[in-house]
Image (tube, coloured by chain):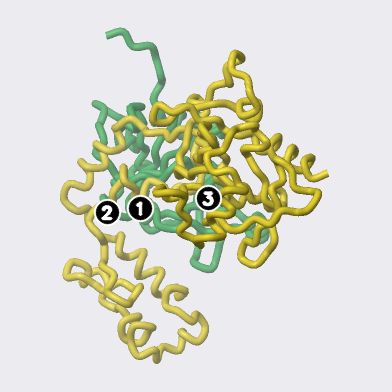
Chain colours: A yellow, B green
Amino acid sequence: MNRSSPFDAFIPSPENPPLAPDFTIANGSDLPILGEANITVLENDCWNKIGVTGDRSCPELLKHVHCRNCPVFTSAGQRLFERDLPAGHLAEWTRRLAEPEIVAERGTVSVLIFRVGEEWLAIDIGLLVEIGELRPIHTIPNRSNEVLVGLVSIRGELELCLSLGGLLAIKMQYPPNIAKSAATESGHHSVVGRDRITARLMVVSRAGRRWVFQVDEVEGVSRFTPAELTNVPSTVSGSATSFAKGIFWRDERRIGFLDEVRLFETFERSLT
Amino acid sequence: MLWLIFHVGVERFAIRSDRVDKVLPTVELHRTVQSPNGLAGAFSYHGAVTPVIDLAQWLQGTSTPLRLSSRIILIPLDAELSGQKFGLLAERVVELRPIDQEVINATGAATWPGALALGPVIADEHGMLQLLDIDKLIAEARRHELLPVLVEQHV
């Protein structure tokens, strides 16, 4: 049960749009301007006379700094509710509360979907730091291999750049070394032949460590419910699926949800 | 502990917020024929028939006036916050306020043996405050037959 606040029923949402407003907020002011209907309720709008939207002569301002912290303003706000019910209020709320309760699906996972070679993969969006254009990747003599591509400068910091394609044994559309030279030659708007390069650098972070890896295309953010995630079929073999927690379907594409623990542990091992 | 402050007539009442499920606006209430004094009626809360006790009518004999600040405090019948709920119709349900247990102890909270056993009365900076003990309230409401008896219906 949602226990955030007993006043939840009053928080406007798409299913629960606010009823007629009690007051309006004028441009540049965050304090209510009294409409015709409310004059009888609030005769003393001192915040508009001696308060922050008035001449600021109120001695209480020294103590409360802003009218919204002042008990006079608070009680004035509470008095706004000391009014008769607007027309249709009872019937509207009777109808709304009688409707079946809409319970949001729990355990929904937000992911970033991207492509490596022919494989569509997804990673927990919480791990993502940023997505960047391709930059020159500097190989490390005697250390670079098919998983560790080299070093790349991200906002002035040298980060390790790894290859998902190398790790998962997927043939990448833009192998890091080729895309690197293309990026070096033509800057940010790197072009190979007539096609714009869709490859991007993804910066991810887990347990305080940052990693950069290159992907062939970034699709965007999506989400799936636990029920949508199915196990990898045992008939499917290959590294890409063995690093997946499960698969789900989006737009008739099979997407592997990467197991970040296994993935980053393997990255760590590739460095030693 | 946060307490939900409300009024019954001119008297101030408070109820522990952890026993409150939701605070709802007033709705149209179905009045049962020959319903006991204090029962405001019943409404459909997402399909569940939910009785509403009008505290002003029950305790003071005058119905709660229907204003924007009059609200239905939805309370589960058991402390686990599940299962059947009932509503308390009260006035000026506009404030949540923390009240320390030490304050309750220090002000010499009083109850009267002969009175309806609803909980202790304390004094704070705004005056006297009746703390509603929800379990006692439910017991008293049952004794006064304000809460329905659920039976298998064959119509």
Q: Quadrant of residue B34?
A: top left
Do the numbered discs 2 and 3 sit on residues whose CB atoms are within 8 Å? no
Q: Which residue is mark 2?
A: B67
- Spot occupied by residue B23 in the image (x, y as percentages of width and height): 40, 46
Q: Chain of mark 2?
A: B
Badge 3: residue crowd in 10 Å (few <14, some 14–19, many ≥20): many
- Residue at figure coordinates x 45%, y 42% from the top left: A219
Q: Chain of mark 3?
A: A
Residue B150 relative to residue B123: left or right? left
- Counting from the top left corner in percent of width and height, residue B154 is at 31, 8
Amino acid type at mark 1: Glu
Do the residues under discs 1 and 3 have CB atoms within 8 angstroms? Answer: no
| Residue A41 place in picture, x, y as percent | 25, 69
Label 2 packing within 10 angstroms: few (<14), some (14-19), many (20+): some
Which residue corresponds to the image point at 61% horizontal and 29% vertical from the top-left? Answer: A240
Residue assigned mark 3: A200
Q: Is residue A127 visible?
A: no
Q: Which residue is mark 1?
A: B91
